[in-house]
Amino acid sequence: MLRFRFMAEAKLQVIPLGGLGEFGMNCLALRYGDDIIVIDAGMMFPDAELMGVDSVIPEFTYLTDNREHVRALILTHGHEDHIGAVPFLLSELDIPVYGTAFTLALVERRLDEHEMLENVNLNVVECGQKVELGCFTVEFIQVTHSILQAAAVAITTPIGVVMHTGDFKVDPTPTDNLLFDLHTFADYGKRGVLLLLSDSTNADRPGYTESERAVYPRLDEIFTRADNRIVVSCFSSSIHRIQQLLDLAKVHGRKVAFLGRSMSEVTEIAHNLGLLHIPDDTLLRPQDIQSMRRDRVCVIVSGTQGEPMSAFSRVAVDNHKNLSVESGDTVVLSSRIIPGNEKAIFRTLNHFARRNVNLIYGSMNPPVHVSGHASAEELKLVLNLVRPKYFMPIHGEYRQMATHAKHAQHMHYSGLEQTFVLETGETLEIDKRGARKGEQVPVGRVCIDSGTIDEFVDDIVIRDRRHLAEDGFVLPIIAINKHSGLPETLPEIVTRGFISDEDGSTLMQNARQVVAKTLESSSAEERGDWGVMQEKIRADLKRFLTKATSRRPLIMPVILEV
Amino acid sequence: MLRFRFMAEAKLQVIPLGGLGEFGMNCLALRYGDDIIVIDAGMMFPDAELMGVDSVIPEFTYLTDNREHVRALILTHGHEDHIGAVPFLLSELDIPVYGTAFTLALVERRLDEHEMLENVNLNVVECGQKVELGCFTVEFIQVTHSILQAAAVAITTPIGVVMHTGDFKVDPTPTDNLLFDLHTFADYGKRGVLLLLSDSTNADRPGYTESERAVYPRLDEIFTRADNRIVVSCFSSSIHRIQQLLDLAKVHGRKVAFLGRSMSEVTEIAHNLGLLHIPDDTLLRPQDIQSMRRDRVCVIVSGTQGEPMSAFSRVAVDNHKNLSVESGDTVVLSSRIIPGNEKAIFRTLNHFARRNVNLIYGSMNPPVHVSGHASAEELKLVLNLVRPKYFMPIHGEYRQMATHAKHAQHMHYSGLEQTFVLETGETLEIDKRGARKGEQVPVGRVCIDSGTIDEFVDDIVIRDRRHLAEDGFVLPIIAINKHSGLPETLPEIVTRGFISDEDGSTLMQNARQVVAKTLESSSAEERGDWGVMQEKIRADLKRFLTKATSRRPLIMPVILEV
C-alpha cells in the first residue's frame, strides 16, 4: 500500500489559467497524476485597449491538450468573472459541472443564450456535500459574498488538502442569515492543510469589510426622505441588496418594478429557487411605472457600469419606454465602480443630474454600497483558521496578491513554509520534498465579439485596430500594367483617421511623389516582385510621413495588376 | 452721471468657454459692454475615446470674434487645467496676462516650449493687489490649494462684484503658512457680492478636506520604517508636498534626488523663486542615486498618472538609467488617481509589486495624499462669507455643480436670489432687472497632437479613428478603364482590423462578388458618376458585411481610372 502510494504520488500541480495578476477571468486547474479538475471558468470585461471586443476568456489550450484527464468543472459562485467562460469551455470539453443551485441556474441562463442547454451535465451540490472526482474529494463550504450561495472548496488530494476560498468576505450578519462556515475551515486547519488559495481582491484594504446589512440604514433613510420615485441601480446578481430594497419598499408602502433584461431574468431565477422573497402586492410591471403615484414606486434597474445599452443608461437620457425620471426623483447607484468604467458611469450620473434628481452615489457613512470581498483582517482570520503549509494568493492584480502574501508572512505562525505569488500561466508543484514553481503552461486571452459569425477575435486584428485608433491609415494604391510591369498612373493615396483632408492635401500630393519615386528608382527585377515593392513603398512612405507629421499611421501599399 | 451709468450699463455677461460640465480646460470670459476679460485658459487630458490625441483645449472662437474687446487674461493658479492652453490663446490674441509669480513662471515654461517667450506681456501680481482692465477692477485674493500661490479674484464691474474662487480648499495649516484670506472674502461679502463663481470639484464629498499637513505623519512613518530606498511619486507642481519630503529627508538623514523632466524643471522654478527650501547638502544628482547607500536616498519622481514615458513608469519596468529599484525599497504614490487613468496607474504599481518593493498608495489613515479641493463644508463656508445674490458653480462635471447648487439652496440665507447651473457655452446675463440665461456662444474642444506639423486634430479624423478602432476598415478597390468605363478586373478588397485573414478569406471572396454585382447591375450613366458608384458600392457592401458578421467596419470604396 505504501509502495503503491509512493508510486502513484508523482506531484500535485496547481495551474492558474486566468485571474492571477489580472482582474477577472478566473480559472484554475489542479492536477495530480492523470486527474485534472478545473475550478471556475470566468470572463473578463475588456478594457478600452482591446478595441471593440465584448468580452475576454482564458485560453483553454492546457485543458484541451489534456482533455482525457479533465474530470470536472467546479464552480465556486455565479459571478461572470467565475462562470462567464463556461459555455466556451463546455463547447470544447464534455465534462460534468458542479456548483450550488443558484450558481448553476445562472450558468443555465448563459448556456441557454448559446443554445447549449442540451447535453450538458450540471450537478447541484449543497455546501457540506462531498464529490469524488478521480483522485480528488471536493467538499463545498459555505462562505459569504455579495452573491447568493457562494462556496469555498476543500480538495483532498493524495498528498494533502488544498483549500480554495472562491470569492468571499466574512460577513457576520448576512441578509440570508447563512453564515461563513468558520467551523469547517477550522476543522480542516486543525487536521492540516497543505495549500491555501485565497481571494486577494481587497488585500490592500485595511480592516474589515462592512456587512451587507450596513447598507440598510442608508437605504432606509433614502426611502424615508424620498418624496417621489426611487430608482436604484445595483448588480442583478446582488440578490441580498435587492431583498433589502424589497423589504424596505414593503415597509414604506412602495411597489417595486424591475427594469433591464438581466435584472428581470436574475430576480426571476432567484425567486423561482425560493431565494428572493417578494412580499405580496409589491411587484409592479414595468409598463405600469409611469401611471403609479411617484411616491409609491421603487424601480430597481440593471446597468451599474454605465453600459451604453443598459436600462440605467437609457433611463438617464430619457430613452426608456417604461420610465421617465423627473425633477425631484431620487436616483441611487448602489454598486462599486469597476476600474476602467469611471468615465461611462460618471457620464450616466451627469445625465441624471441634468434632470434635477437627487443623486446618491459614492462613499458615505452609512454606506450605500459595500464590497463583497474580504479586507486585510478577514484575510488574516482565514489564514489563522487554515494555517496552511503553503500559501498562494489568487484573484487579483499582482500588487494585491503581493500584499496578501505579506499579510501571511507577517503572521509568523509556525507551520507556514512558503508563500508563492504566481501569475496566470506559472505553475506550482508540490510533492513530498516540498513546493516549487513548475513549468509554464500555455495561457492567453481569447477575445470575443458576441453576436458575430466568428466570435473569436484574432490578436492581430486587435493590434491593427489599436494602431488604426492611434493614427489612422494611409493606403498607397498603384495600378501596374501586367504586361509592361510599369505603373499605369500616378499612385493614388487613400487615408482616413490620419489627417484632415484640408490639412492633408499638400502632404498627400507630396506622398504620391514619394511613392512614384520609389517605383521609378526600383529595378525591373524588384518591380517584378510585389512583396519587395510593397515593403519598399511602405518603408519610404513611413519615413516621409513620420518626418512630416510625427505620426505613424498604418501604411499598407496595394498593388493592382491591370 | 446716473444717466451715463444707465446708458453704459447694458449687461454683464458670464461666458464659460470650458470647464463647466466637464473635467479640465477651465476658461471663462466676463463681458460688460465693450470690455472682456478672460479668467484661466486650461487644457484637458483627453480620454481614450479621443483616439491618439495628446491634449484638448477650448475653442476660442468667441474671443477671436471679439478680439478688439479682450482686455486681458487673468490666471488663478498654475495647474495645467488652468494654464495649459495659454500658448494657444496667446498665439491668437495679443493680450496682457496677469497672475502670481509662480503661476507666470509655469506659464513661461510652457511658452518657452512653444518658442513664444518673446513678445508676450506677462504681469506678476501679488495677492491684495488690484488691476484695472477696461471697466473691470480685479483684486487677487490669497487662497489655499495644492499648488503654491493660488488666488481667487474679485472683479468689480459697473453693476456689482463678481467673485471667482479659482480652485481652492480652506486649509487652516498650509505648509507655507499662507492662510486662506477669509477676511477679504468677508469684506466683499459684507459690502455685497452680485455673483459668486466657485470651484465644484469636490462638492459631492461631505465634510472638510484634510490639510496638506495631514500627510506629514504618514510620510514621517514611511521615512522611519524604510530600511532601503524611498521613491515617492507626486505631481511636480505639489511644491508643498515636495517641501515636506525635503524636510523629512533632512531629519532622517537622507539625500534627495529629483527624477523626471517636469519634476526637475518645476522644483528648479520654485527654488529660484525662493518658494522651495532645499536644506544644505540634501540634493543628490540623479546619476549618483545608484552609488548611494540605499538607506540614505529619497527619490522624488514625476509620472503619477502612469504616463508610459514618464520617469515613474520607466523606473517601474527597470528602464531608467538613474534608478533601478530593488527588493525591499519603498515606493510611494502620493497623488490622486485622475478618473480614466486607473488602469495605467495600476499597471505601473503592479510592475513595482513584481520587484518586491513595499508599495504604499490609496486611501489610509493618516493619508498619503490629500485633495487640494474644498469639500462640502468648506464650500458652504465660502458661500456663507460671500453670501452672493446669484450663485453659479464652476469647475466640475454636471453632477458636482448640481450638488454645489443644492448646498447653496439648502443654506437659506437671505439675499440669495437664484442659483444657475450652466454648462460650457451657455451664458449668464445680469443687469438691473435681474439675472437669466443668455444666448449660447460657440464653444468646442480642439484636439492637439503635440509635436506634429499641424497640432490641431480635426473632429472628423477622431471620429474616423474611433470607427476604425471598433471594427477596422474594408476598402473595395475597383480599376475602371477610362475609355470603356468598365472594370478592368474583379474588384480587390483590402481590409485591416476587421477580421483575421484566415476567417475572412471566404467572406472577402464573397464580398468581391457583391461589389462586382453592384457594378454589373449599374447603368452606364451611374458608372459614369464616381460619387454615385462609391455610394452604391458602400451601401451594398455594408448590408452584406453587417448581415454576415454583425460588425460595421469603415467602408471606403476606391475607384481608380486606368
Image (cartoon, coloured by chain):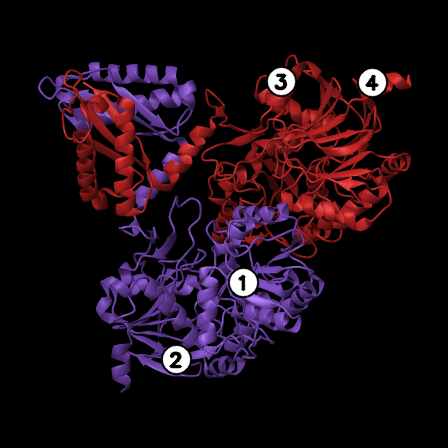
Chain colours: A red, B purple
> Could you tell me the amino acid type at mark 1?
Asp
Question: Which residue extends farthest left?
Answer: B483
Badge 1 and badge 4 in a common chain = no
Which is closer to the viewer, label 1 or label 4? 1
- Judge depth for marks 2 and 1 and give the one in front: 1
What numbered label is drawn on residue B319? none
Earlier along the polypeptide chain: callout 3 or callout 4? Answer: 4
Residue on which disc 4 sits: A7
In-image side of A183 versus B560 (left or right):
right
Q: Earlier in the sequence, mark 2 or mark 1?
A: 2
Q: Residues within 10 Å of mark 4 (few under 14, many from 20)?
A: few
Question: Number of marks in the image?
Answer: 4
User: Which residue matches tag 1?
Assistant: B288
Circle 3 residue: A65
Give me the disc on residue B125.
2
Q: Nearer the viewer, mark 3 or mark 4?
A: 4
* Tag 2–tag 4 contact (CB < 8 Å): no
Task: Read off the chain for label 1.
Answer: B
The front one of B123 and A234 is: B123
Query: Label 3 is placed on what type of residue?
Result: Asp
Of badges 3 and 2, the one in the foreground is 3
Task: Using the numbered discs, state the Cα–Cα distance from disc 3 to disc 2 in whole angstroms.
Answer: 73 Å
At which x and y percent is residue B358?
A: 67, 54
> Mark 4 — on which chain does it sit?
A
Residue B516 as seen in the image, left or right of residue A390: left
